[in-house]
Amino acid sequence: MPSTGIPERLVSVEEAIAAIPDGASVAIGGHTLRRHPMALVREIIRQGKRGLHLLGWNNGIDMDMLVGAGCARVVETSYVGMGALGLARNMRRAVESGQVETVDHSETTAIDMFRATALGVDFLPNRTPLGTDLMTYNDGLVEITSPFTGQTYAAVRGVQPDFAILHAHTADVHGNVQLDEANWYDNSVDSFIGRAATHVIVSVEQIVSTDYVRSHPRQTYLPREYVTAVVHAPFGAHPCCCDARYGYDQAELRAYYEASKSAETFDAYLTDRVRSVRDHWEYLDKVGVAGLLTAATRPSVTQGAVQA
Amino acid sequence: MTYTIEELLAARVSAELEDGGLGFIGLGTGGRSFVFAVGIPSIAIALAHRRGIDFIAQYGVALEPDIENAPGCFEDRNLLAWPAAANLPVETCLDGFKRGKMTVGFISGAQIDKFGNLNSVAIGDYHKPKVRLVGAIAQPDHAANAKRTIIILPHSRRTFVEKVDYRSGFGFGDGPGHRERLGLIGGGPSKVFTDLAVLDFEPESCRMRVVSVHPGVTREQVVAETGFELIWPDDVPVTPRPTAEEVAAIREIDKDGKFLNGRIF
């Protein structure tokens, strides 16, 4: 029988995000338009945060939107792009104009900066960046020598972001965060990000009972000792895809990409989709039931393959 | 038989693939870069399979998926339903690179230099770039760790430069001996495939040299589109055309143009 004194960590999106001060370092989960915590990202923009140091390992609309909204000062990851749509245009403008500073990684060094901290060490050795300009410009990559073999490595500095923001499938009110068995493994790095940060905010598709969690313990990938706040945000990754639960909202992604072609048109997009909308629930109303259900249930555009 | 340049490249890349090999393909970015980084290698591997070559294709976190029945959209739910031998956590897949399991890395970039170094981070000054690109992604991991890399990219003076503005993928670095001094486990670039020619690297100098020029392409065209001096053979061979059987097989495998026309969202 679990203790009756277990605290509840279920809060509103507004309350969870209000804890992030300007200038904080914020690591973002997900992988290039896959399960990014978009409801949390939109709330950061609504609250007008400034000067954030964003970290991730493989990013897209999440970082591009925060950069386009003027929330970020530093972007640290291996990739910011819009997948099949092309370059992340807000990111491109902000870096070319000097508004945002970049700290570049390869996929493995970006993973290792979170994995080191999650493993309880302050760096991990990795040969990948040797001899590249990743080492020239990123002071978190430093050459070291193995005491055993004399092999040269880059030491990848572990990071402990002030906050991590993640999206997942289910959680109980105590913050035991779970994934469906059908979860696409490109997002497995979320687990390292969640175990590296000081404060961890997780939005989930569904709040489930503690009895449900306790009868499905193998689905828990981030237990409550790592989790600061849980937020209920169905379709919280929209317009990204979210494992077997819903696919891309391709129309919304295309509209975003089109709007991002200039600072002016993007500002209009933010006003319409984010700033004029009170909260995540009103955002869902704005997208509309038909739009959401289309992303969740439309026949796959797959030609000739087994359909989900 | 008429054929497209993408079909020629898929057939030529396929001929490079060995029995018992393992090649990693990323899920790629959009448009033309998808065709070079994902489309051509995918069709090359499927063609090799039809020849009976045992070559493991690793697609992101999916091992040995059914390339001939790939989904038309790489959203999670389609990838979860794509038949494969294994889905592994992404860090496990990438640890395999560092462990030396990848025999072929298929990579591309916005710039390449005479020593096969690649750039996919920034054009111009790093701190105030003329063009900010998507970032290094796994390109440095392929370049450092694969037994060999096969580089596929469009041939132009903008792409083929004397020195890359930012070295994100390590080719032969500053030249002979550089990889060895760093102790990189991978062998570096083996061949470069472009829309004009096939190239490799002279072992003594590590400098890029011409292997063959595609049918209908002149030496002058290649020189005009290359921003550094290439090493040329005395007699310049013409790249073999794909056979009628190869073209027919490619069109059957890629019947809806997903790979070679970049129709995957």
Image: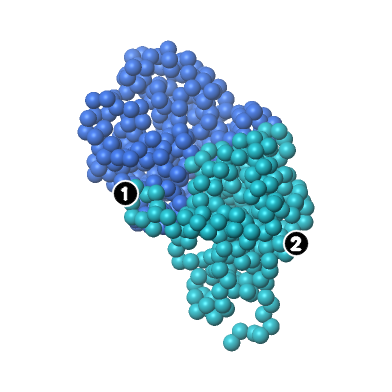
Q: Is residue A73 above or below residue A283?
A: above
Instruction: Let me know if residue A248 appears in the view.
Output: yes
The quadrant of the picture occupied by the N terminus of chain A is: bottom right
For the residue carrying disc 1, how many other residues have a C-alpha within 10 Å: few (<14), some (14-19), or many (20+)?
few
Label 2 amino acid?
A: Ala
Q: Secondary structure at mark 2?
A: loop
Query: Which of the 4 image quadrants contains residue A209?
Result: bottom right
Chain where mark 1 sits = A
- The blue chain is B
Q: Is residue B128 left or right of residue A299?
A: right
- The cyan chain is A
Image spot of residue B28 (x, y percent): 47, 42
For the residue carrying disc 2, how many other residues have a C-alpha within 10 Å: few (<14), some (14-19), or many (20+)?
few
Q: Where does label 2 land, which residue? A: A19
Distance of mark 1 from mark 2, alpha carbons? 48 Å
The quadrant of the picture occupied by the C terminus of chain A is: bottom left
Residue at 26% across, 32% down? B247
Image spot of residue A255 (x, y percent): 56, 43
Residue at 61% across, 66% down? A232
Res A293 label: none
Label 1 amino acid?
A: Gly
Q: Mark 1 or mark 2: which comes first in sequence? A: 2
Q: Is residue A113 above or below residue A257?
A: below
Q: Is residue B118 left or right of residue B20?
A: right
Q: Where does label 1 land, which residue? A: A304
